[in-house]
Image: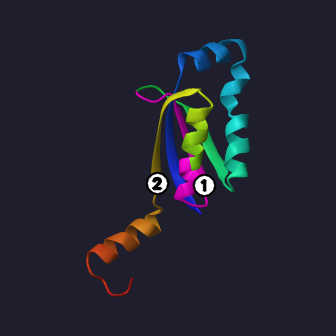
């Protein structure tokens, strides 16, 4: 399974809805969708800046990550979603060794 950083910018309608139902921001919908895709949510944060929500999740593959982004968009609750695959430190070391031509990789 691979880890992903997902940054999302909700619509004004989403924020308006959360004013009357603040628990929506807890991400029950997100957990359901990620689990249906065979993954797990490791954390959900609100943030300041270009993106208002940050998710770290584990998904089986890039196709599942793309499906999650599409689910966000088709729900009509997000203006934009940015998905970034994450490497563990061990994976980054393996990539560095492979880039340097180290035959042990």
Which residue is rendered at x = 72% and y = 50% of the image?
36
Which residue is rendered at x = 69% and y = 19% of the image?
22
Per the rendered image, the range of residues in magenta is: 50-66
- Work out whether 11 lies above or below 81: above
Figure colour scheme: rainbow
Q: Which mark is residue 58?
A: 1
Q: Quarter-wise, where is residue 1 in the image?
A: bottom right
Q: From the viewer's side, name the closer residue of 47 and 59.
A: 59
The quadrant the C terminus occupies is: bottom left
Q: Quarter-wise, where is residue 91 in the image?
A: bottom left
Residue 66 relative to residue 39: left or right:
left
Label 1, secondary structure: give it.
Answer: strand
Q: Between disc 2 and disc 1, whose residue precedes? A: 1
Which residue is rendered at x = 46% and y = 69% of the image?
90
Q: Which mark is residue 85?
A: 2
- Within 10 Å of disc 1 (Cα), the crowding (few <14, some 14-19, many 20+) is many
User: Residue 35 appears at what percent x and percent y?
Assistant: 72, 50
């Amino acid at each position: 399974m691979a880890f992903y950083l997902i940054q999302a910018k909700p619509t004004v309608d989403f924020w308006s809805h959360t004013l009357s139902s603040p628990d929506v921001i807890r991400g029950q919908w997100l957990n359901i969708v990620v689990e249906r895709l065979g993954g797990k949510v490791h954390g959900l944060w609100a943030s300041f800046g270009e993106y208002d929500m940050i998710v770290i999740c584990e998904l089986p593959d890039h196709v599942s990550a793309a499906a999650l982004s599409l689910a966000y968009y088709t729900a009509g609750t997000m203006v934009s979603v940015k998905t970034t695959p994450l490497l563990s430190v061990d994976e980054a070391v393996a990539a560095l060794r492979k880039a340097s031509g180290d035959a042990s990789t």
